Amino acid sequence: SLLEGKKVEPKLIAFKSKSNFAPGHVKQPRRQSTQFLWEGWDTEGMRQYRKLISLYVHPVVNDNDMAAVKAPRRKSSIQERHIEEAELRSVYVIFISMPHVRAKITGNFKEDSKLFKLLNDIMKVSTRELSRFSGHLRQFIVDDKGLVLIATFGLRGSSFPNMVTERALPATTVIHNALLSELDVYSRVGATFGNAYCGVVGGVKRHEYAVLGPSVNLAARLMASPKNPGILVDDAIRMKAGKAYGFNALEAVKAKGFANPVPIFEPLSSLERGWGKMTPGFVGRKTEIKELLSTARKMASFNSPAKFAYISADSGTGKSATVIHAVEGIRKLINRRRRRVLIAKHVCKESDLLLPFSMLRSILPDVLAENSGFQDEKSAMSTSRMSVTSGTSFGSVDGDWEGMSAVSAQSSNTKVSGLSGVYASPERLLHVCREMEAPPEFIELVGHHLLGIDIETLTMLQGGKKTKGKPPTPQATVNFMAQAFQMCTKKANLVVIALDDVHQMDEMSWKVLQKLFITTRNLLVVCTSRPQTSQCKLSVDETFWDDLNDKYIEQGRFLPMKLPPLCKEDIRTMIATELKVDESSIAARLHDDVFSQSGGMPHFAIEILENAKRKKIIGKGDDGLVDWLSTGDGKGKFAFGSISDLILHRVDSFDATVRDVLNLGAILGSSFDLFEIVAVLQHFMGATKSQKSIHAQKN
């Protein structure tokens, strides 16, 4: 009526203190654009309406409605709609191939049924992990070229803050590991990040949604690269990931469509940076690995007391690599036997000697997450330090991605300081303490001081009651840690704790390990350490260490192993694997040189071979054997007289500034006075003799 020019008396429709309707009981009509409610109005009426409606709605809505009225209405074509929906987006693209899967129908019902089941399982595992991280499966292709999966992050519905670090890159590694662990399917993954066209391609009657761009093509090239060790990513992902991941830089590759060689990287988790990862060309240590596998098999079959395997060797002998392959072998073995195994890993650092319970700070959040007596919706997914195998299921996942994502600020899960990707659940800790009937002081000690959970969160979970008692004694804390570990892992047929460089582990962690060894069953502890000397001693209780080397050896519960250098035949196998040639085609001179120069140490042998490949000084001679490339005098073009020569060669390849720093460190030593530092600075800054003498007199 107001728009038609009629005078209308105002009416009272509400009081400030009284409501004339109850919100929630009135059925809200479907939202409609206002242009459908006011069709037929002339231009002047619409202007008046616009002035009135602008008092109540956002200007954007008002402008859209006015534009819709002014524009001629017509039905858009399918092609126009496709053009309107197309866009350029920053997309993370994953290409996954399974080179060992032969997706060919044979006509044999039994064989074809196995193939169909395998393809279905691959689809289930891939979509399950993508769903957890909110990614999209773009294509699942099975053709004469093999099996390829294409997944994306960054499209509508899968674009998030910190997408690469918190979702896309973790999903890439999880899918790769899940396919291998659950289905025993080896995959090659190529992943890139960049701008891409996202929209419909094709004709009106036959078209599909596609993601096109140089980064997409590069992901396919990385997947198919012969240098792919399992997962390859481009430099854009490395830059986006920041410090959350480590990357192993590989030799740049030439890719179709790129003028310059493309830098490529292998992503490593924080644990892999310390432990390393499984390598296809691992050579030797069959006796030690076989003994560990046999021990684990017997322990998983019977209710056995705990056992302790202690591997001692010098740096470069390959003790960490031996444990990595042994633990993976144990996981596969128990998996085939349909038993449940928990594997916890920790790499000890030099700073751990000054940090009480350093081992438990690392693995306890994962152990708490495996507490089968308590399930919460916000529990974290299994992390890189703890892996769970039960039958053909790898990983214990009770909640979705939103429950553990750092984006979920309202989550009561607290990210532990200094532990990448590990989340401690205060609810789980509280549940464990209540089951053990532990005093409330333990919640604050373990939750706050060891796991880094906020005091406010712990107080709130305890009903607002603050801890008033005395803090528990160190021995009581050791007992609590051991009991909590036992309670959370009691459903497993076998628990494996793998610890690297235990000569750097603190005394309190050793006490917990000692308590677990004495009181726990079906626990296998695998440790590595350098040989004990006056400069390298274990912080373990001397009585316990004597018992290990005495009565526990007799009982078969302590398994000391000393890794010797590789034999000459193992070095020959390593050369053949590294150079991808047949063992019979390796020249005796090359074999003898690598063995003598490396001293049978795997790390140094690999260094020699990689350096030779970089310099391209190994090749086939006139006799058809792989050997050093010869010079005019008939001698080898490349050889080191000893390991010292190899180290000097590597040092000489450093930049001059790096060599200066190394020389400086060698001169100053591990301890020095402030005066010596000042003298060095004056030398580099060009101080005069008079200035030096004045400074010397003052000191």
Image (spheres, rainbow, N blue to C red):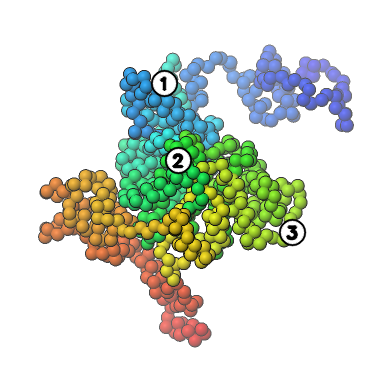
Q: Secondary structure at mark 3?
A: loop
Mark 2: amino acid: Ile
- Image coordinates of residue 12 in percent, x first then y, are 88, 24
- Image coordinates of residue 575 in percent, x first then y, are 25, 50
Per the rendering, the mark at residue 469 is 3
Per the rendering, the mark at residue 202 is 1
Q: Could you classify mark 3 by the number of other residues whose Cα lies within 10 Å: few (under 14), some (14-19), or many (20 or more)?
A: few
Label 2 sits on residue: 334
- Image coordinates of residue 408 in percent, x first then y, are 62, 41
Mark 1: amino acid: Gly
Which of pointers 3 and 1 lies earlier in the amino acid sequence? 1
Identify which residue is drawn at 26% across, 49% down. Answer: 573
Mark 3: amino acid: Gly
Measure how far apart labels 3 and 2 are at the Cα level.
45 Å
Single out the mark in the foreground, 3 or 2.
2
Vertical placement of 159 versus 201: above or below?
below
Single out the mark in the foreground, 3 or 1.
3
Res. 152 visible in picture: no
